[in-house]
Amino acid sequence: MAQNTKPPSILETIGEEIIRIVTPVSICMFLVVLLVAILNTDTSDSSSSITTMATIAYNEDPSDSLWDKIKGALLNSLVFVVIVTVTTFLLVLLFYFRCIKFLKFYMGFSAFIVLGFLGGEVALFLIEMYTFPIDCITFLVLLFNFTVVGGMSVLMSNLPILINQGYLVVIGMLVAYWFTLLPEWTTWVLLVAMALYDLAAVLLPGGPLRLLVELAIERDEDIPALVYEARPVTHDESALRQRRLWRLRRSVDSGSAENMNSESNSSSNANTVSNSMNCQNETRLVVAEEGQRRESVSELAVPLIPPPSQSTRDGQEVISSENLHLEGIGLGSSGAIKLGLGDFIFYSVLVGRAAMYDFMTVYACYLAIIAGLGITLMLLALYQKALPALPVSILLGVLFYFLTRMLLEAFVVQCSVNLIMF
């Protein structure tokens, strides 16, 4: 006897997903804070002597005035965002012309370079600081094997997902530590600029990330990028069929809207009706095939939020067409939450930069970032579309950093000096 069970709420279904995405983010931020606390004993000279893509327009000097630092930081951030935008559009163009192998090899080569050069440099610093006894040949062999496995984890999809996830966290940690060596004002302005860029690139109709996602769905292909998946993805035909249904439904909706605005004839009405019938038939076919696979699919492949179902006269469940929306960067076709590696990097940069001042600001920034990430995941569960992960967390983190540094620290220090407990 069939029983009508109440669908779980958003809070009941999203809790496990938040834990699975917050854990690697927290590990990455903790490792960056650890590296900053160990290696950055004196950052006043190193931050001003480094000339990189983020400081190509202006290199901050301690003797410069505050206004000059702010103007230089704005100029550096503008140049960096322009370079990132041009590079992203170039990746969209390569993906449009189906240069998939080139993009995959490029991602693997980038991972190899980061792990080999930045990872090797950090390892040498740690070996020198703790006087770890190791010869040059052994170090090179271990570093080469480490980097090769990291490049393969990016290129190959048949490796265990834990290896891929672990290497993505390590890559994010190394790049974030490199960003913490930038000048202070350039770092803070760059964080805000990247948050605004992420907002525009994902939500605007002509944004590069939005174009990339829509193009991937139209071709039933995965985006070749460094993206962290919160859980394994089951590759079956149901995801592809849902993508096809989304395309068919979009074409039917656009055709019906044009017919309502213009004078329709009998032939156009017949085509619209036939397309709608084909879409409904394929919907029933998807439901039937998903019903056969429901027992074999593991719990990890269950979508983030179960789609609302409508009971028919036969007692079967039909997936509502409103849930066959565009899958985005945040939510994959199998329900797995996806977070770009850039989000890991800039979260860790904010916390790492706060660690250069005081650990109280680290705690405040960490809580702000996690709160912003939780808000973003809640919005992702509600809207079921691609959402930027940087704006809420970065803006909250920057706000909490300056509030803690200017207000909370002075209050806590005065309470400690006067032996006041609260």
Image (spheres, helix red, strand yellow):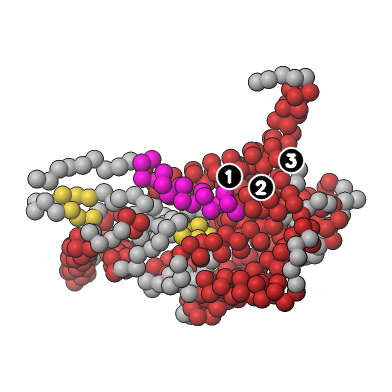
**Does residue 286 appear to the left or right of 302 in the view shown?**
left
Labels 1 and 2 touching (C-beta < 8 A):
yes
Per the model, the C-alpha gap separating discs 3 and 2 is: 10 Å
**Residue in the image at 77% along x and 57% along y:** 130
Mark 1: secondary structure: helix
Look at the magenta stretch and give its main secondary structure. Answer: helix
List the residue tagged with mark 1. 369
Q: Earlier in the sequence, mark 1 or mark 3?
A: 3
Mark 3: secondary structure: loop
List the residue tagged with mark 2. 351
Can residue 283 be seen? no
List the residue tagged with mark 3. 358
Residue 17 lies in the magenta stretch: yes
Residue 221 location (% of width, % of height): 40, 72
Q: Quadrant of residue 116?
A: bottom right
**Is 249 or 258 nearer to us in this picture?**
249
Per the model, the C-alpha gap separating discs 1 and 3 is: 17 Å
Residue 140 location (% of width, % of height): 70, 75
**Residue in the image at 86% along x and 56% along y:** 45
Residue 173 lies in the magenta stretch: no
In what quadrant of the picture does the C terminus appear? top right
Under mark 2, the amino acid is Val
Magenta-drawn segment:
11-28
In what quadrant of the picture does the N terminus appear? top left
Under mark 1, the amino acid is Ile
Residue 269 location (% of width, % of height): 19, 66
**Residue in the image at 43% along x and 66% along y:** 214
Residues packed near mark 1 inside 10 Å, few (<14), some (14 to 19) or many (20 plus): many
